[in-house]
Amino acid sequence: MATITEIKAARAVAGAAYAAAAQAYADAWVELHGYDQALCNTALGQPRPLGFAGAPQPLPHGEYLSQRIDGGLIDRAKTRAAQIVASFAP
């Protein structure tokens, strides 16, 4: 049997893991969406849009993910796409 202290400690570990996973998800979205946008750039010759229909919205948690982390993701992806296109060498 677990004590209340052990249960609270395990909850804290789970909460930290959730917050880290949500941030990793958002960061991976930025990277993938950046590549999708870069490939749609006419300089790279992809005629059709690729990718997502919108930005991710990880579910908030009152204690471990109380701040929304989806703000600025589209701008970050645009910046990443510009970096990718700039690095293109045919």
Image (spheres, rainbow, N blue to C red):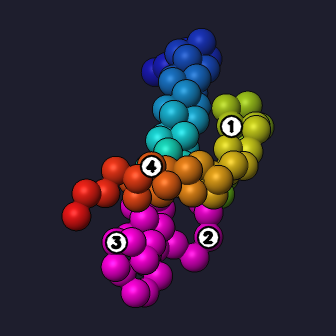
Q: Position of residue 58 (x, y in %)?
A: 62, 53
Q: Which residue is mark 3?
A: 44
Q: Secondary structure at mark 1?
A: loop
Task: Report whether residue 13 is seen.
Answer: yes
Q: Earlier in the sequence, mark 3 or mark 4?
A: 3
Q: Position of residue 37 (x, y in %)?
A: 47, 67
Q: Which residue is mark 4?
A: 83
Query: What's the residue type where badge 2 is placed?
Result: Gly
Q: Secondary structure at mark 3?
A: loop
Q: Residues within 10 Å of mark 2 (few under 14, many from 20)?
A: few
Query: What's the residue type where badge 4 is placed?
Result: Gln
Q: Is residue 79 above or below residue 7?
A: below
Marks 2 and 4, how far apart in space? 21 Å
Q: Which residue is mark 2?
A: 54
Marks 4 and 1, how far apart in space? 30 Å
Q: Residues within 10 Å of mark 1 (few under 14, many from 20)?
A: some
- Circle 4 or circle 1, nearest the eye: 4
- For the record, the magenta segment spans 29-56
Q: Which residue is mark 1?
A: 65
Q: Earlier in the sequence, mark 2 or mark 4?
A: 2
Q: Earlier in the sequence, mark 4 or mark 1?
A: 1
Query: What's the residue type where badge 3 is placed?
Result: Leu
Please give left or right for residue 22 compared with residue 88 in the image: right
Q: Is residue 46 above or below residue 90?
A: below
Please give left or right for residue 62 compared with residue 32 in the image: right
Q: Which disc, if any, is residue 88?
A: none
Marks 3 and 4, how far apart in space? 13 Å
Q: Position of residue 15 (x, y in %)?
A: 58, 31
Which is nearer the eye, 16 or 31?
31
Q: Secondary structure at mark 2?
A: loop
Instruction: Name the residue rendered at 69%, 49% in the picture.
Output: 72
Which is nearer the eye, 4 or 85?
85
